[in-house]
Structure formats: structure tokens, C-alpha cells
């Protein structure tokens, strides 16, 4: 799935050792989070924040998680009704989207700040 451009991971490394991350599947302009792990405090959270910046930069429309919990709530997760979800899927699964991982630190910070900026 990765070689065909559907599976993607965001990883945290420390001293050449994988310490956390997440992975999921992309279909069109939708990203379906499958799993997260962390061997070092906050490594999976950092991966999720980086994923959010990447998806925002690449104009993805859905970041679907398997669970709705307090861990995800702190990052702005919210539930939607099934009818709305189905409509979003219909509009976005067939879009030709690229998961471009090229993003530098300052660009990532600017995107994240724009998402939480309150005026």
C-alpha cells in the first residue's frame, strides 16, 4: 500500500531510534488514521500535530480517526453525523490528491498557528 501511495507514516526518531509515530491510509483527499504509538512521552502527539500540518498544506478534507477520545479532542477533533460524513466522503474520495511530506519546520509552525489563531 505504501509503494502504491496509499499508506503513509509520520515518525519521530531520537538518536537513530524510532520512538513514536502514526500511520494511516489515504484515499483521495481523505486520510484515515489507523494506529499511533509512543515509546517516548508525547512522540505520538508530535506526529499527529505534524500530520495535521501536512494534511492542511495539501488541502485534505477529512482526517478520520477510529476513536473519538480526550487525546484527540485536545487537537480539535470533533464528531459529525453519519449523513454529513457520507457526503464528505462522496465529495472527496475520488479527488486526485498527493500526500506531499515536504514541509519545513517554520512552514509547519505557521500552518498550525493559523489553525489555532483567535482574533
Image: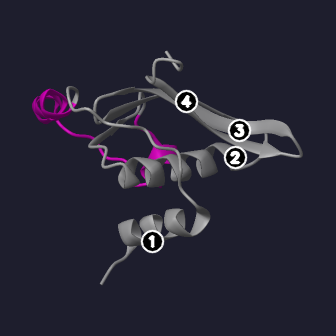
Q: Do the CB atoms of the residues marked 3 and 1 lie less than 8 Å apart?
A: no
**N-terminal label among 3 and 1:** 3
Task: Point out residue 11 in the picture as x, y percentages from the top left corner.
Answer: 66, 39
Residue pointed to by mark 1? 113
Instruction: Calculate the distance from the C-alpha at mark 4 to the C-alpha at mark 2.
Output: 13 Å
What residue lies at 20% left-to-right and 26% top-to-bottom? 94
Mark 2 Cα-neighbour bin, 10 Å: few <14, some 14–19, many ≥20: many
Magenta highlight on residue 103: no
Which of the 4 quarters of the picture holds residue 99?
Answer: top left
Task: Point out residue 19 in the picture as x, y percentages from the top left corner.
Answer: 78, 39
Residue range in magenta is 68-92
Q: Is 52 situated left or right of 95 in this image?
A: right
Q: Nearer the viewer, mark 4 or mark 2?
A: 4
Q: Do the CB atoms of the residues marked 4 and 2 lie less than 8 Å apart?
A: no
**N-terminal label among 1 and 2:** 2
What residue lies at 89% left-to-right and 46% top-to-bottom? 15
Residue pointed to by mark 4? 23
Mark 1 Cα-neighbour bin, 10 Å: few <14, some 14–19, many ≥20: few
Q: Is 104 situated left or right of 81 in this image?
A: right
Tag of residue 89:
none
Q: Which residue in the rendered view is the most extreme toward the right?
A: 15
Instruction: Calculate the distance from the C-alpha at mark 1 to the C-alpha at mark 4.
Output: 24 Å
Amino acid at each position: 500500500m505504501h509503494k502504491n501511495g496509499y499508506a503513509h507514516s509520520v515518525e519521530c526518531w531520537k538518536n537513530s531510534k524510532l520512538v513514536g509515530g502514526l500511520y494511516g491510509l489515504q484515499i483521495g483527499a481523505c486520510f484515515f488514521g489507523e494506529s499511533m504509538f509512543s515509546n517516548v512521552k508525547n512522540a505520538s502527539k508530535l506526529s499527529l500535530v505534524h500530520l495535521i500540518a501536512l494534511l492542511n498544506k495539501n488541502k485534505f478534507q477529512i482526517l478520520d480517526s477510529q476513536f473519538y477520545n480526550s487525546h484527540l479532542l485536545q487537537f480539535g477533533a470533533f464528531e459529525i453525523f453519519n449523513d454529513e460524513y457520507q457526503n464528505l466522503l462522496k465529495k472527496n474520495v475520488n479527488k486526485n490528491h498527493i500526500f506531499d511530506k515536504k514541509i519545513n519546520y517554520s512552514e509547519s509552525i505557521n500552518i498550525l498557528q493559523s489553525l489555532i489563531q483567535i482574533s
